[in-house]
Amino acid sequence: MEDHQVDEKTKHAAVRFLNKQWNNLSAMERRVVLAIVERRHVSHDVVKEADDDRTFGERIADKVAAFGGSWTFIISFGIVLICWVVLNSFILIRSHNDFDPYPYILLNLFLSMIASIQAPVIMMSQNRQAAKDRLDAAHDYEVNLKSELEILGVHEKLDDLRDKKWMALIDMQQQQITLLEELLRGGKSKS
């Protein structure tokens, strides 16, 4: 919202709650003040919004990272390695064929290729997760700021109510004192 479109109530709320002029507020602080003035919510599902904006490559990177960091991957990868070693050892012993003789150089090549592809994909997914975490932290701050300001507003209203009650009690007490004084004066005049 541009400065010339902001009403005086909103500008006053900025000074009242944040002790800053409207022009000195950050974009997040402006959103919070407007939400308070307009009685709107600021909370929303940041993670869902970030997930909805993913590209095809980012979705694949997330799935590869999720699978690569699971027990399913570790166990299945271990089984494949054991089968490779057992099968190649058995073929080597039975037929003296040099398919992939010990120390299994072809297997090492495949493992290196998988690692060289898997590492950057996992890094892409971690970078996306870090960006989501930053968005989530910023959103948490915005919600917390609005909550804090709303609580301050409630405290102000309670203080005003308390002050009004005290004033009403003092007025009532003053009226009672006046009535008692009149009763005492009326009793002295009869005696």
Image (cartoon, helix red, strand yellow):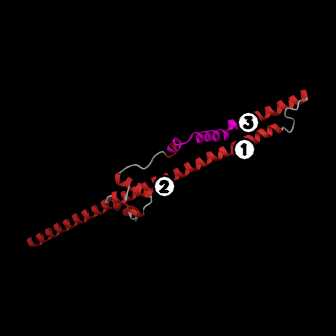
Q: Is the magenta stretch mostly helix, strand or loop?
A: helix
**Is residue 70 inside the magenta stretch?**
yes
Tell me which numbered mark, 1 or 2, is placed earlier along the sequence. 1
Which is nearer the eye, 121 or 40? 121
Q: Distance between the residues labelled 2 and 3?
A: 42 Å
Q: In which quarter of the image is residue 171?
A: bottom left
Identify the residue at image location x=42%, y=61%.
25
Q: How far apart are marks 1 and 3 (CA)?
A: 16 Å
Q: Which residue is most to the left?
A: 190
Which span of residues is magenta-colored?
A: 49-78
Give the number of the mark in front: 1 or 3. Answer: 1
Label 3 crowding class (10 Å Cα cut-off): few <14, some 14-19, many 20+? few
Q: Name the residue under label 1.
A: 116
Q: Mark 2 points at which residue?
A: 141
Identify the residue at image location x=58%, y=47%.
128
Residue 105 placed where, x, y %? 83, 39
Q: Quadrant of residue 72?
A: top right
Tell me which numbered mark, 1 or 3, is placed earlier along the sequence. 3
Q: Is residue 123 left or right of residue 110?
A: left
| Location of residue 100 with respect to 153 vertically, above or below | above
Give the number of the mark in front: 1 or 2. Answer: 1
Q: In this view, does 5 lie to the left or right of 77?
A: left
Q: Name the residue under label 3.
A: 77
> The residue tagged with tag 2: helix, strand or loop?
helix
Q: In which quarter of the image is residue 165?
A: bottom left
Identify the residue at image location x=70%, y=42%.
117
| Location of residue 108 with respect to 152 vertically, above or below | above
Type of the residue with mark 2? Tyr
Residue 157 placed where, x, y %? 33, 58
Type of the residue with mark 3? Phe
